[in-house]
Structure formats: structure tokens, C-alpha cells
Image (cartoon, grey):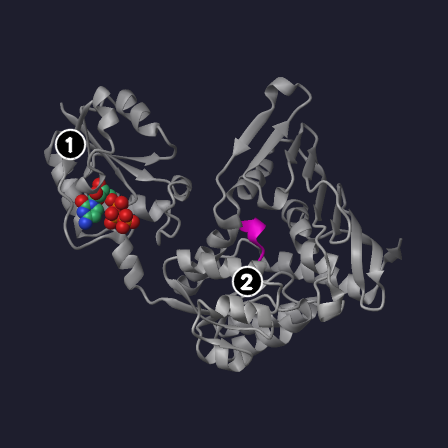
Amino acid sequence: MIKVITYGSFDMLHYGHIRLLERAKALGDYLVVGVTSDDYDKVRGKINLQQSLMERVESVKATGIPDEVIIEEYEGQKIDDIKRLGIDIFTVGSDWAGYFDYLREYCQVVYLDRTQGISSSEIRSKKRSIKIGLVGEEEGRILNKYFDEANVVNGIHVSGICTINKKLREEIGERLSFVTDDYYALLDKSDAVYIISHPREHYDQIKAALLKGKHVLVETPITLHESQCAELFQIAGQNKLILMEALKTAYATAYNRLLLLIKSKKIGKVVSVDATCTSLREINPQNAGYNQIWNSICAWGPTALLPIFQILGTEYTEAVIHTYYYDKRNKFDAFTKIDFTYKNAVASIKVGRGVKSEGELIITGTKGYIYVPAPWWKTDYFEIRYENSEENKRYFYQLEGEGIRYELVAFSKAIDSGKNLAYIKENESLAICQIMNQYFEGKNIEII
Ligand code: CTP
């Protein structure tokens, strides 16, 4: 029996794929098809597949051509598969000609002519593109990144920018034709907006966008009041619109794996989550005033709160805030520490734009702990550590575009499918807003 193997993403299965599978099968008696996993595709730079791994596997199976379907998960797996399954022929389309010659050491390699005029990328790009408008005065770094990342994601393009920041207008304006300070004019030109204005302005801007039928991706925190956030989610739901919190760490692969490992009890029961995020960059209140710049709790609080609420839940019994002010009148904190008490656990965050500390995340469990080195919020690496250090494990996952790219992909998929695919649940977003509310209302807060 001659065994043949072929690999591919097989996204939105098309005629070219079917022809390839038929010819691959005709090369022998038994065909194995390797479908690439979502993670492996991310590593290969294919981040915007439209279908999940399971959907792709199902459609390959449904052709009735393969005898066996396997998942391709890691670099170098092809050699393992060929040996393990006793493969005689490896085959792929001619777009890969020469690339897999190194497999000739293990089996015969055949490149089949690629079918002209069709590809998954082409089908994906023909889909209606979502026009996203960028909004905000932020110093420019993040908006610029969103602009660059939006250009990488299939199915999204930037319709314009709304800002009163002159520097930003000049910088981004060079590359964009529509630059305005009129928010409503931008909304008219867009299907969706990404908002990174000061959190104080979020509520009005989000509401205006939703009421005009536009989807919203908003920099975290969504609002400074829990009740406002709940109202906005309700408006979005009623109007079948997507309202998503832009908190890029939630979309980082390493962070998501870490959550899964905790769920599978790798470190036993979690008793403490401690997260620190600081950035000591020059703050220049002369330009905008302290009421315009993001204070420490707004800039870093949501990121630091994310692992706490996602690991221990949002039902804490108490949160005590300790704050060191730069500018008390405008509630501009240089540093804030929050101590949480849960029924059977504790947690803490330390955030600051006027202090410097080690930006690490430590999750303490009854069997061991997880250590994520600084800067943990954009990590590609973490360790599980045990009493017996020989049992320690290291985990590495590639992170592209600080997570912004994956976040934009999730946003565009959510819009296409009409389902909220956010990695942050509504109750977690609400809990973040609740902490913002507590801070600004000065409840249970100690000044240091
Ligand atoms: N293939 C083919 N003819 C096409 C498209 C793909 O023979 N018109 C083959 C590829 O050479 C590969 C297999 O089908 O052996 C799976 O390819 P895949 O990368 O999943 O499909 P593409 O349409 O090329 O996807 P993309 O546009 O995302 O690269």
C-alpha cells in the first residue's frame, strides 16, 4: 500500500484545494491530510484565517477524499509524521516547489501543479472590508500601532482619524486621506471605530457610535462607571453591534495558555495573583494638563486587573486602594496599589506611571507557581516553578504585534459573525469599571 501525505490550512475550502486532494490521493492508495492548527498558523504568519481549526478539519473530511486527517501543530512535525505513519510520498502544490526537498531523505516528494486563479487569500480579501475609524488624542504611539496593525489584517482598512492632536494629525495624516476633528464626520465614513480618547470621553463617544449603528473597539477601561458600561453593552446587544474592550494582553497566546494551564490545575489551587505594571516615561502636564493625560490607574489598572478577574473571578469581598498622588486635584496618581480579598484567595496590583518596579506577574498555587517575567503584559514566555526545580517547565509562544493584531482579527470576526468573540467577558469589563469608579469616588482609598 502506498501512503501519501499532504498539508495545508484549507481555509474556506475551494476548488483548488479539492483538485489538489484528488491528485494527491491518486498518487497512492491511502491519503493522510495534515490541517494546520491555529497556533501553528499564527507562528507561520497566517493570522487571519476565517475558519477555526475544527471547521477546516470538518470541511476537508466532508470532501470524502482523505482516509485520515491529522493536525499539524509544530515546526518539524512533518518528519515525525512521515516516520510515524510510514509515508511513501509527501506532496504539496507547486507554490512550495523546492521548499520541502529536505524531506527526500525520508520519502518521495512530489510537487503538484497549483490550480491557477484561486486561493484562500483571494477569497478572504474579496469579503467586504470593514472600514475602521481611529479616534483619540493619545500621545501617538498606540494609535500609530493600531494604524500599522490594521493594515496587516485582511478585511479591515482604516477609513480616517479623528483627533485634535496636531502632531498626530501630521504624522498619520501623511498616510491617510481623511483626517478630521469632527467625530460625527468620521462615524459617517466608518463601519466601526477604535477609540483611545481619554476614558472620561469614552461613554459619550461609544454611545454616539452605537446609536449610529457602528461597532466599537475601545481602549480599556471602557468607562469610568460600571453602570455606564452596562448601559453601553445593553445598547450594543439590542442593536446587534459589537462593543469590545481593547486590552491587548487578553489576546496574547502565552497569556491564554497560562489561563488554560491554571484551569487544568497545574499549580493546584490558586491562592494569590500579583501583577505589577509600571512605565516611567516623562509626563508633560504643561501640554495638556493632568486632567488630559491618562493617570496610572487608567493607563495600567485594567491590564493588571485582567489576570486577577480572569483567574479568581469578579466576586471579591473587598478592594482596598493605596494611592500616591502627583496631582491630587485631578486625581492623577503616580502609583496605586490595590489589595483584593476573596473568599479563599487574595490578589494585588501595583501600577504606576511615576514609579519604576519589576513588571512581573506571579500566580501562587498550592502545588507551584507561575512566573511571568517583565514585561508580563506583552510576554511570549513564562515558567511554571515547583519546589523541586527539576520539575519546572518553560513555555514559549510567539507574540505578533503585541497582541493588537489578534485583537483586530477577533474584532473583525465578531463583526462578520455577529457573535461577541471578545476574550474579556462582560462581567470582567464591568468589574474593571467598578474599580475605576471606586478610585475616582475615593471609596476605601488610603493616600500614602
Ligand atoms: N493549492 C492548490 N491550488 C490552489 C490553492 C492551493 O493546489 N489554487 C494547494 C496548495 O499548494 C497546498 C494546498 O492546496 O498544497 C493547501 O493550500 P493552502 O495554503 O491551504 O491554500 P491557499 O489557497 O494557497 O491559501 P492561502 O491563500 O491562505 O495561502
Q: Amino acid at mark 2?
A: Leu
| Residue furthest left in the image | 26
Mark positioned earlier in the residue sequence (1 or 2): 1
Q: Is residue 255 magenta?
A: no
Residue 52 image point, x, y percent? 37, 49
Q: Amino acid at mark 1?
A: Val
Residue 185 image point, x, y percent? 49, 81
Q: Is residue 108 visible?
A: yes
Residue 321 image point, x, y percent? 82, 54
User: Dot 1 surroundings within 10 Å: few (below 14), some, or many (20 or more)?
Assistant: many
Q: Which mark is residue 143?
A: 2
Tell me the residue that label 1 is attached to. Answer: 110
Residue at image location 49% in from the left, 55% down from the top: 407
Residue 357 image point, x, y percent? 75, 43
Task: Say which of marks 1 and 2 sits in front.
Answer: 2
User: What is the quadrant of the N terminus in the image?
Assistant: top left
- Write down the region rendered in magenta: 244-251
**Mark 1 residue CB less than 8 A from any atom of ligand 1:** no
* Residue 315 in the image: above or below residue 253: below
Q: Is residue 192 left or right of residue 340?
A: left
Would you identify the image quadrant in which residue 293 lies?
bottom right
Residue at image location 67% in from the left, 28% down from the top: 368
